Image (cartoon, helix red, strand yellow):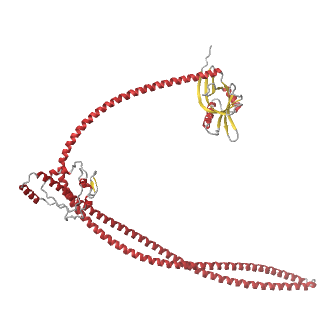
Amino acid sequence: MLLYEVKMTELLFNKRLQVQVKNRETDERRSVIRISIELQLSSNPVHRKDLVVRLTDDSDLYFLYNLVISEEDFQSLKVQQGLLIDFTSFPQKFIDLLEQCISEQDRESPRFLLQLTSASSAFDHSPSNLNIVETNAFKHLTHLSLKLLPGSDTDIKKYLATCLSSAKEEKQQLEQKLRKTEEDLTRQLNYAQQTLSEKSRELDKLRSEWTSQTTSLSSRHMQDLTAEREKALETQSRLQQQNEQLRQELESSHHRSTQQLQTKVSELETANRELIDKKYKSDSTIRDLKAKLASLEEECQRSKQQVLSLRRENSSLDTECHEKERLVNQLQTRVAVLEQEIKDKDQLVLRTKEVLEATQQQKNSFEGNAESKQLQIGKLEATVKSLSEELIKANGIIKKLQGDLKALVGKIKVKNTVTVSQEKILQETTEKLQREQRELQDTQQRLRQKEEEATKLKEQLEATIQKLDESREVLKTNENVITWLNKQLNENQLSRKQESLGMFETPAAGMRTGSVSHNMVQFNPMSAKPSAAEVSPSTLAQPSNKENGEPVGLDSKYFERRDDSIPLRGLLPSMHLNREVPKPLNTAGAKPTPAAASAYFPG
């Protein structure tokens, strides 16, 4: 019965790492070696797991080292190197150590490194050791050391065959990808050409449509233009009425604004006078308060000096009192010592009396020693008398010191009362001074507020005066522009009328024109005729915005640009000739330019 061995390989790790290579003769060098780890499962009659470690070099295809670790080999390796893991977790721990080496290989002094050592002079056919070393401050610690065998010729041939087969597979995959990309690109190119031809046809259609639309729009525009010219005749009369209403409204508003401004100016002047009077009064009060403040400060300085002198006297008296108390204490201790001695002497006297009684009893037996005892008794009495005299003197001295102490205490009490009264006076003066300073600050603050109000009122007065001047200038410019426009309209009407009636110069026509001029309505925009100084070229030819139709002077709502507006020269032939031409202003030869008129009536 034949048994076929079935092997299944699982690739666990396949990366290039920097390895420190060294042998017996050559120096250490670093080279990049590919390490692959595979797990082979063989289903023979007995299931086996083998871990295969292979070292190869992509630049040298004949460089091949293999290591096959079975479960029995791992047990011996575990015993030899003191490993704490089993065979199932060994591949993952081995891969973790290799990942640590990869993360540390770019550093100058890596912590984890791989070493490939050989005992022979060259890596020919001798086994080599793959060591994973951790470098610390104390030593080089080898975590794992694997003994790899060089590949034989058959192993190298198998390895080269596998490399060739993988290269062929990669080549076939790349060729398939290339074909797919070429097909996609040709398909996209055909689609782009089709879309280009369609877009060109659409462009031709759009061009033809655009030409037809431009012709139709030009014809429509001509029709609209003729309709707008007809509408302009109606708008001219409406604009004249609006100008008349605008002039009347401006005159009334100007009159009201001037009256309001005059009343405001009078009110502001009275308020300004009142503020000036208040300012003078506050200045006088400030001067009085400053004088009071100076006097109070002088009194405060004097009181402070008096307090300092009294404090010095108080401190000197305190030192004297302490010295006297110290003397009294010393004398009291001396008196206590003397009293103790007196008590001792009294006890001796009592004892002598007892001895005397004993001697009297033993008088018969001790008559020979009586004289000596009497002498001793006399000496003791003398010492008792002297001690009593000293005690009397000490009591007198103590009484004198107590009297002096009472006198000093009385003086100290008087001085304390004086200092307390002086401090009260000083506190009152400081409080008065603080109140005066607060009042002075309040008055200064009120004065600043009044000055600010006065400046604000002055600014308001100046602003109102400036607005009044601006409104007057605007009124002047508006009146001048209105008169100039009426003049231009009337001159254009007269010129057209003369051109139309020039060929019929008859007396009847002259009589008709005379009668028409006699019956025309006088158009006077102002109640008073402006002088030549008021109507100057600078006021007539002010800057304007031709694009927006917003002149300087009149409000922008009366000069909005209309879409249906046309030039004045198209309106002049249809003007009615039954109005009187206003008299031209004597502006000393200054004519407003047509640009100024076109700014107010944009075409």
Q: Of residues 415 and 237, which is closer to you in this image?
A: 237
Picture quarter with the N terminus: top right
Residue at image location 18% in from the left, 45% down from the top: 227
Residue at image location 20% in from the left, 43% down from the top: 224
Q: Residue furthest top?
A: 1
- Residue 46 at least partly seen: no
Direction from residue 289 to residue 519 in the image, left or right: left
Direction from residue 68 to residue 259 in the image, left or right: left
Residue 576, percent across and down?
A: 13, 53
* Residue 537 quadrant: bottom left
Residue at image location 8% in from the left, 56% down from the top: 510
Q: Of residues 204 and 21, which is closer to you in this image?
A: 204
Residue 527, percent across and down?
A: 19, 64
Residue 467, percent across and down?
A: 30, 63
In the image, residue 368 above or below residue 126: below
Direction from residue 486 to residue 98 in the image, left or right: right
Residue at image location 47% in from the left, 25% down from the top: 178
Q: Of residues 530 and 106, which is closer to you in this image?
A: 530
Q: Residue furthest left?
A: 508
- Residue 337 at least partly seen: yes
Residue 8, percent across and down?
A: 59, 23
In the image, residue 1 above or below residue 242: above
* Residue 364 quadrant: bottom right
